[in-house]
Amino acid sequence: MPRTNTRDRIQQTALKLFAEQGYDRTSLREIADDLQMTKAALYYHFKAKEDILAAVAEEQLKPIEDAIAWAQAQPSSLDARREALRRYATALSRAEPLLRVFEENQAALCGLSFGTAYCELRERGLACFYAPEGELPNQLRSVLAALVVQKVPYALDGMEGSPEAKRAAVLEVALDLLTLGCRF
């Protein structure tokens, strides 16, 4: 199997195990066993589980960075903010398994470079939706719109509905908040 396919399989398996068991409670041995490969074969591709998660983060956080950069380059208009929120929500949903691992393993990951980078990225994402021109309640609505797409998907786990329907509902509520927050 080509190296890239093996690396991809390792990353997907590790991400699945990190989500199921937690980052701290998942060992390289467990990742290798799940892949039915030797630990030595796993070491050929990644020396540590931190390296695996860093590789996943580098790939999956890039679209979020791109959405934030796009939002920052736009004029301050309701249409631009609505499109920025759509792009941001789409990028977040594509990285959902990784972001779930970050959210559920903050204590273990906060000291690692990619954990810090994720926290900074999350704050930059929120900052795109600050509306300093408006009154405080409207500013809050704008920031809450970004928080809705960042955090609410995890609260919907026990609710009925397909993942697509849940994502659509989250975006609808976030866009409503953003629209209310942009009354300036």
Image: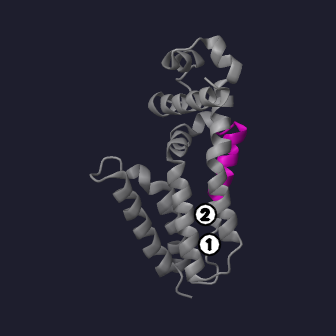
Residue 36 within the magenta-colored segment of the rendering: no
Q: Which residue occupies the foreground of this view, 7 or 149?
A: 7
**Crowdedness near tag 2: few (<14), some (14–19) or many (≥20) residues, C-alpha within 10 Å:** some
What segment is highlighted magenta in the picture?
A: 110-124
Quadrant, the C terminus: bottom right
Which residue is found at the position 52% from the left and 20% from the top?
35
**Residue 130 circle label:** 1
Instruction: Give the percent coordinates (x, y) of residue 34.
Output: 49, 19
In the image, what residue type sits under mark 2? Leu
Please tell me in which quadrant of the rendered image residue 113 appears. top right
Instruction: Give the answer, above or below, for where 4 lies relative to 100.
Output: above
Does the residue at mark 2 contact the one at mark 1 (Cβ under 8 Å)?
A: yes
Q: Is residue 8 left or right of residue 179?
A: right
Relative to 94, 69 lies left or right? right
Give the residue at mark 2.
Answer: 126
The kind of residue on which mark 1 rests is Tyr
Q: Position of residue 168 (x, y in %)?
A: 39, 63
| Picture quadrant of residue 79 | bottom right
Magenta includes 113?
yes
Residue occupying the point 38% across, 56% down: 164
